[in-house]
């Protein structure tokens, strides 16, 4: 019998904090790593946060260190605007087809911004969850990695394209870019495809689409960010009024058999963190947190106790049943029942925030292998059903940032073991 071929390269699918951690750890252990990410930048949803929890420091701190580690390690290659189209083969010798979407901007880009200045077309800004508009020639965010502009496909195909191209003095804009595919042979695959917030429009009794001053917790992170749509000012979307009376609605769609049956575990802490945003910016503000249970385990309970000690943060044990917005004042009214006091709750605030849960991206976008196993909610179990395929981070379970980093280290070890153990 011939000797089986084992490829030493590890493929990491997803460039969020889990994927980055996996790639760096495997690369620094001496293994060749290819990292693919569908967005035009690495960093995932962590890059969109205002502050990490529980240290409450800006995410750029940790991301910048990791990007530096990647730049200094020749074992890591990465591709943005890239997705896995197909996987064939087996552990030790997978053949993977990667699809690259055109960026229309090449490596000559110096981020001078002249293309954006020449561009008139605007599109919804995906980095701000659609809460702002951005030029169709844009830098994804302030610390984008790679630090390179991208053109929206509508701009590249439209009448403005040549004018925008002419504005670039470095020949960085390539309107002839086309979708490309290439193949990789890898020994193991780490699936770090991340998560998406639960769609709030599916929670019918909250009327999300009709209530402009009702936002989600991920949108709240962008509002509070200095590079967000309001430069860090906590103002409500309808009229720019300062949001000094804010309510947080926990388990928005979660632990609900008609929506998201499970608990994401981190939403309570996210709202506690965001309550501090409001209180720090507006000393005369009032925050109400409507909850079923507050889940702050182990060392994180200290943070909960600290927020509880603020007499301007009120906790109401209630599953909010209805949310409406006054068309004249823009104020938002929440209605439910205080299950401790045993009486109805009716609360009017400037703005309300829905603590929506985490949905693994594998719930909608499956790994392109028929044998892969999933739990009832779309998460990858520890045994994925395919030898050499490892799930990591929030495709395995809802996780906070620090847990995702730990998960990345574990996934790197499993991927290496998959190769050397053959």
Image (tube, rainbow, N blue to C red):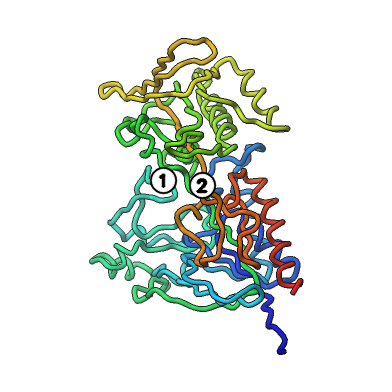
Q: Which residue is mark 1?
A: 129
Q: Is residue 58 above or below residue 114?
A: above
Specify whether 333 is left or right of 318: left
Instruction: Classify 380 as above or below 253.
Output: below
Quarter that holds the N terminus = bottom right
Nearest the viewer among 364 and 177 is 364
Q: Which label number is shown at residue 319?
A: none
Please indicate whether residue 191 sits to the left or right of residue 224 in the image.
Answer: right
Q: Nearer the viewer, residue 125 or 357?
A: 357
State the CA–CA distance, disc 2 to disc 1: 9 Å
Q: Secondary structure at mark 1?
A: loop
Q: Residue at x 59, y 33 (%)?
A: 269
**What residue is shown at x 47% (from left), y 24% (from top)?**
319
Query: Contact, CB < 8 Å: mark 2 with mark 1?
Result: yes
Residue furthest bottom as drawn: 1
Q: Picture coordinates of residue 329 (x, y %)?
A: 29, 21
Displayed quadrant of residue 181: bottom left
Vertical relation: 218 (above or below) 336: below
**Label 2 neighbourhood size at 10 Å, few (<14), some (14-19), many (20+)?**
many
Q: Position of residue 364 (x, y in %)?
A: 45, 54
Name the foreground residue: 202 vs 175. 202
- Crowding at dot 1, Cα within 10 Å, few <14 / some 14-19 / many 20+, comes out as some
Q: Quadrant of residue 172?
A: bottom left
Q: Residue at x 43, y 14 (%)?
A: 345
**Residue 45: x percent and y percent?**
52, 49
Name the quadrant of the C terminus: bottom right
Quadrant assignment, res 340:
top right
Secondary structure found at label 2: helix
Residue that carries the numbered disc 2 in the rendered image: 48
């Amino acid at each position: 019998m011939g000797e089986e071929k084992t490829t030493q390269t590890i493929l990491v699918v997803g460039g969020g904090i889990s994927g980055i951690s996996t790639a760096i750890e495997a690369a620094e252990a001496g293994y060749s790593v290819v990292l693919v990410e569908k967005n035009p930048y690495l960093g995932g949803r962590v890059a969109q946060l205002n502050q990490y929890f529980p240290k409450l420091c800006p995410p750029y701190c940790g991301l910048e260190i990791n990007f530096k580690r990647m730049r200094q390690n020749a074992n890591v290659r990465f591709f943005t605007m890239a997705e896995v189209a197909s996987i064939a083969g087996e552990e030790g010798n997978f053949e993977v087809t990667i699809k690259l979407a055109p960026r229309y901007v090449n490596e000559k880009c110096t981020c001078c911004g002249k293309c954006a200045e020449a561009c008139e077309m605007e599109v919804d800004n995906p980095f701000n969850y659609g809460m702002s508009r951005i030029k169709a020639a844009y830098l994804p965010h302030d610390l984008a990695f790679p630090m390179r502009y991208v053109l929206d496909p509508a701009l590249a195909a439209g009448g403005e394209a040549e004018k925008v191209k002419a504005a670039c003095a470095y020949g960085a804009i390539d309107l002839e870019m086309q979708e490309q595919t290439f193949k990789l042979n890898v020994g193991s695959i780490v699936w770090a495809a991340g998560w998406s917030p639960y769609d709030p429009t599916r929670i019918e009794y909250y009327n999300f689409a009709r209530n402009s001053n009702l936002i989600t917790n991920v949108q709240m992170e962008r509002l509070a960010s200095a590079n967000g749509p309001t430069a860090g000012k906590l103002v409500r979307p309808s009229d720019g009024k300062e949001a000094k009376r804010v309510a947080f609605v926990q388990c928005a769609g979660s632990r609900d058999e008609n929506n998201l049956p499970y608990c994401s575990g981190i939403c309570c802490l996210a709202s506690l963190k965001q309550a501090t945003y409001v209180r720090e910016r507006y000393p005369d503000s009032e925050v109400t947190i409507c909850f079923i249970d507050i889940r702050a385990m182990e060392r994180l309970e200290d943070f909960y106790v600290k927020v509880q000690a603020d007499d301007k943060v009120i906790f109401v044990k209630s599953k909010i049943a209805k949310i409406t917005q006054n068309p004249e004042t823009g104020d938002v009214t929440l209605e439910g029942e205080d299950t401790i006091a045993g009486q109805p709750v009716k609360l009017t605030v400037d703005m309300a925030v829905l603590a929506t849960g985490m949905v693994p991206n594998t719930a909608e976008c499956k790994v392109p292998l028929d044998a892969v196993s999933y739990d009832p909610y779309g998460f990858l179990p520890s045994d994925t059903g395919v030898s050499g395929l490892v799930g990591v981070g929030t495709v395995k379970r809802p996780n906070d940032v620090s847990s995702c980093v730990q998960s990345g280290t574990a996934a790197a070890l499993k991927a290496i073991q998959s190769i050397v153990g053959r």
